[in-house]
Amino acid sequence: MTDQRRSGVLACTALLLFSISPILSAAEPPNPSRKLDVWYVPTPSDIVDRMLDLAKVGPLDVVYDLGCGDGRIVIAAAKKYGARGVGVDLDPARIREARANAKAAGVENLVRFEIADLFTTDLTEATVVTLYLLPELNRRLKPKLFAELKPGARVVSHDFDMGRDWPPDEYLKLGTDGVYLWKMPPYVDRPGPKKEE
């Protein structure tokens, strides 16, 4: 290869790398930022429907799914009820899958998916929070739910409760599965520091 041709190849390579470097820097990390809280087990579609029905999701709701997996809960809320939704998960592979599923369902304008920690995600805009975690994670989330959710917001959990000190407002037994619903009480009735209504 001549020096002139080598220079041309190097220049083209440099230009290509320069043009794609913003794409590379914006790429999602290949692995979760920390160890996952739970392993991925999707909620069956019929249970998703019962969770959303029990929470009385409607077009004015903003549904947050903590540990969203493939995004099926917020996608169903958007598709069936016209609700907006936010799914958070630590696993970039699940977030990529959820975004692809939202696009395939035609609801990408109503939902968004973020690689984020469920314990640090801001829940103040949520009117419905959905969970399929483990009992100890639900209990760790309680102070955050009490601190950030407005009165009347609903929390729906597939299979796992919040402990004896916060019994559900409703419970559905569905074969081997269960669905729990809590309605957030007024601030004055919550444990911890009180907020103004």
Image (cartoon, grey):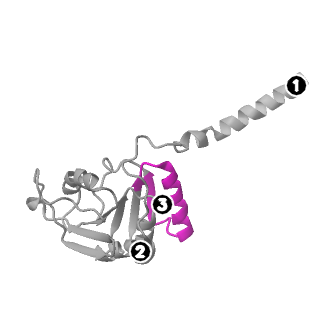
The residue pinned by badge 3 equals: 70
Q: Are marks 1 and 3 in contact (CB under 8 Å)?
A: no
Q: Which amino acid type is shown beneath numbered disc 2?
A: Gly
Q: Are marks 2 and 3 in contact (CB under 8 Å)?
A: no
The residue pinned by badge 2 equals: 82
Q: Which amino acid type is shown beneath numbered disc 1?
A: Gln
Q: Is residue 129 above or below residue 11?
A: below
Q: Residue at x 34, y 61 (%)?
A: 132
- Say if residue 58 shows up in the picture: no
Q: Residue at x 45, y 56 (%)?
A: 113
Disc 3 secondary structure class: loop
The residue pinned by badge 1 equals: 4
- Say if residue 61 shows up in the picture: yes
Picture disc at residue 96: none
Q: Nearer the viewer, mark 2 or mark 1?
A: 2
The image shows residue 47 at horizontal and vertical percentages of 38, 72
